[in-house]
Image (cartoon, grey):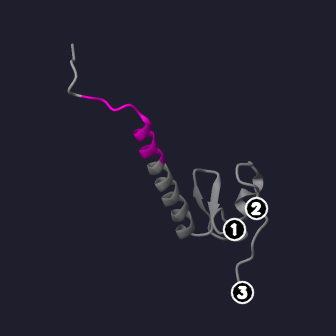
Amino acid sequence: MPPEEAKCPEEGSPSEEFLSCCYSCKKKLDNGDPIYMYRGDKAFCSFDCRSEEILGEDDSDRLDDNSSRNCSPKSSFHGNLF
């Protein structure tokens, strides 16, 4: 039987219900189940689900860093300093 999907709050809307389901797979989190937290506002049903989110954010941050570097003016060490 597949895990029961909970009614999860909409992303970005703070709610007391954020502990009711896994942020990643949307599995219902019951009282007594272990909850893996990330950044204080994302609850996950397992270490694996939490790790997926962390790795996904890391990849996204790297892409953002690379695109901002490509847009910034390039510095030159060959110009006159004085």
Q: Are marks 1 and 3 in contact (CB under 8 Å)?
A: no
Q: Position of residue 6 (x, y in %)?
A: 76, 68
Q: Nearer the viewer, residue 58 or 9?
A: 58
Q: Secondary structure at mark 3?
A: loop
- Res 72 → quadrant: top left
Q: Are marks 2 and 3 in contact (CB under 8 Å)?
A: no
- Res 7 → quadrant: bottom right
Q: Secondary structure at mark 1?
A: loop
Dot 2 or dot 3: first in sequence order is 3
Q: Are marks 2 and 1 in contact (CB under 8 Å)?
A: yes
Q: Position of residue 69 (x, y in %)?
A: 40, 39
Residue at point 74%, 63% (across, down): 20
Residue at point 52%, 59% (across, down): 56
* Residue receiving disc 2: 8
* 3D distance between C-alphas at marks 1 and 3: 15 Å
Which numbered tag is attached to residue 1? 3
* 3D distance between C-alphas at marks 2 and 1: 7 Å
Q: Secondary structure at mark 2?
A: loop
* 3D distance between C-alphas at marks 2 and 3: 20 Å
Quarter holding the N terminus is: bottom right
Dot 3 alpha-carbon crowd within 10 angstroms: few under 14, some 14 to 19, many 20 or more = few
* Residue receiving disc 1: 26
Residue at point 66%, 71% (across, down): 33
Dot 2 or dot 1: first in sequence order is 2
**Residue type of the residue flagged with mark 1:** Lys
Q: Is residue 15 above or below residue 27?
A: above
Q: Seen in the image, is 67 located left or right of residue 81?
A: right
Q: Which region shows up in magenta?
A: 64-76
